[in-house]
Image (spheres, rainbow, N blue to C red):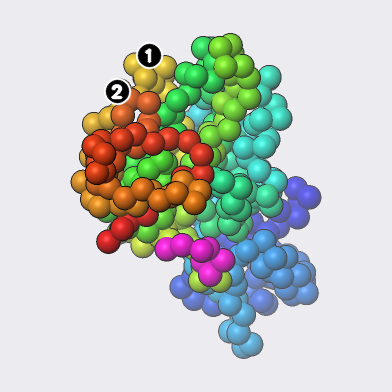
Amino acid sequence: MIDQWQRKREILSVLDSEQFVSGEALAAKLGVSRTAIANHISALEEYGVEVFSVKGKGYKLANSLSLIDETLLKEAVTQRCFYYDEIPSTNAFLLKHCEELSSGDICVAEYQSAGRGRRGRTWVSPYGCHLYCSMYWNLSQGMAQATGLSLVVACSLVKVLNNFGIDGLGVKWPNDIYLDNKKLAGVLVEMNGQADNECHLVIGIGINMSMSRAQGDKIDQPWSDLSQSRVVPSKTELTISLQRQLNEDLTLFEKEGLSAFLTRWKEADIFDGKHVKLLMGEQRIDGVCQGIDKTGSILLKTDKGVESFVGGEISLRSAE
């Protein structure tokens, strides 16, 4: 399996999204047959990599890919770092091994065969196109201490991306990150442990880096990716910066709680002060978004005054 992925990565390092490369040139450069090249490219397409193939011209990527530099990543991250070309789920991997982990350990993959989003949704995870990363954190005071943590992670993501010079970012309660009013990234926090004792926490993050049209068609909401930005950081540098920022912010969160992040959230909140509707199962609440409180609950100004809402099957959508 490792050798097969090495060969596929070699092919991807030669291909780009600007011009075609002939099968003959690929075969000569890698020292394999043209049939082997065709087989590897077919396999890559099964993993979600869109490759244009034109007779007489060769192959070209439909969109640019940014693969992790494993050596650079592991040198830069002081905690343990697990890196895979292919894995069912980075979150599931850390949850399975949480007894062996320390706060700040991360798992990164180029492809997830069973990537998960919030509320049981599938996270579309084509090979090499996006960042799929999970980080482990231990909360000594138990699950109750995690209240509002997913909002902190959203704030961390915005700060990291801003530091790379990416504009047009915002957050949508409870933890989605938007670029130009379309979803760019999501957060999935999972945990196990006791309410009042040690708690194992896994923070999963998916960031759209370069979405092909074919993969984008599988997503049931407006989306964006970093390729649309004037600045596109390398996936390796983005992962390193995100791991460091999360370490810093989660340490602050343990000391001061969500209160330390209320200003950062308000500055990025794309619904702050706007008329919205909040869906809780069959129930719909209309009001004006007033931000969040220190527990992470959303505040809506309704006919009854300012009310807070949290938990359950909640969806927030613009009422305009």
113 magenta-colored: no
What amino acid is at disc 1?
Lys
Instruction: Name the one closer to the observer, 63 or 102.
Output: 102
Instruction: Tell me whether the residue at label 1 lies in contact with that at label 2, contact meaning CB atoms closer than 8 angstroms.
Output: yes
Q: Is residue 18 above or below residue 276?
A: below
Q: Residue at x 31, y 58 (%)?
A: 319
Give the Cα separation between the discs numbered 1 and 2.
9 Å
Q: Amino acid at mark 2?
A: Ala
Residue appearing at x 49%, y 76% in the figure:
19
Q: Is residue 308 above or below residue 184?
A: above
Q: Which residue is mark 2?
A: 260
The dot on residue 150 is none
Taking the image as shown, residue 296 lies to the left or right of residue 11, namely left
Q: Residue at x 31, y 35 (%)?
A: 307
Residue 254, image x, y percentages: 42, 17
Residues in magenta? 215-222
Q: Is residue 185 above or below residue 41?
A: above
Res 255 label: 1
Determine crowd level at label 1: few under 14, some 14-19, many 20+ residues with C-alpha closer than 10 A.
few
In the foreground, 200 or 292: 292
Q: Position of residue 237 (x, y in %)?
A: 43, 42
Q: Position of residue 243 (x, y in %)?
A: 46, 32
Residue at left offset 21%, top offset 46%: 273
